[in-house]
Image (spheres, helix red, strand yellow):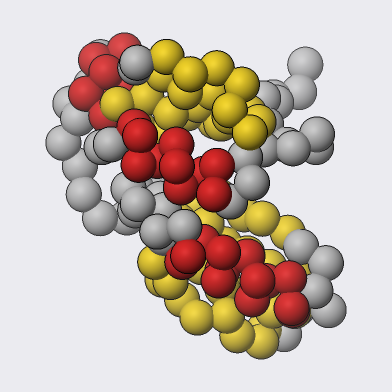
Amino acid sequence: MALEANAIMLAVDDLDRSKRFYTDLGCAVDQDYPNFVRLSMGDRSSMLALYPRESAAQDAGVSSEGTGYRGVSFHYLVASKDAVDQVIRDAVDAGGEIVRKPEAAQWGYFGYFSDPDGYLWKVAASS
């Protein structure tokens, strides 16, 4: 059996702020509860679940403390350089921050933004 990621859960500091950020980027709310939001990221993508940080840590049985690089980034592959630039602009307009300005690479073009909780998103287009 192959491993599949059909749900991504993010522990967030402010559930409403994170929900607003991801809906501003085009995600659709599938379920909305006081301590849980499930978002659809499109037909070809996994679902995205948002939980308050303390609740998510308690569910996993670990400490909620942690800062800096979390050892994970999400990658969004798009069709063109212009699409990379547009997604990064949309993320900033929604409340994210540019982590690495889009630039050319040997294999294409990419940049990074972070969501309001510091999760990294790489947006890339191949040549």
Q: Position of residue 13 (x, y in %)?
A: 25, 37
Q: Position of residue 112 (x, y in %)?
A: 51, 68
Q: Residue 54 lies in what quarter of the image?
A: top left
Image quadrant in which the C terminus is located: bottom right
Q: Say if residue 68 shows up in the picture.
A: yes
Q: Say if residue 126 shows up in the picture.
A: no
Q: Please say if 54 is above or below 61.
A: below
Q: Is residue 37 left or right of residue 85?
A: left
Instruction: Name the residue located 74 percent from the left edge and 79 percent from the top edge.
Output: 81
Q: Please say if 26 is above or below 4.
A: below
Q: Position of residue 91 (x, y in %)?
A: 51, 61
Image quadrant in which the N terminus is located: top right
In this rendering, the count of numbered labels is 0
Q: Residue 84 lies in what quarter of the image?
A: bottom right
Q: Position of residue 30 (x, y in %)?
A: 61, 21
Between residue 51 and residue 18, name the one nearer to us: 18
Q: Residue 90 lies in what quarter of the image?
A: bottom right
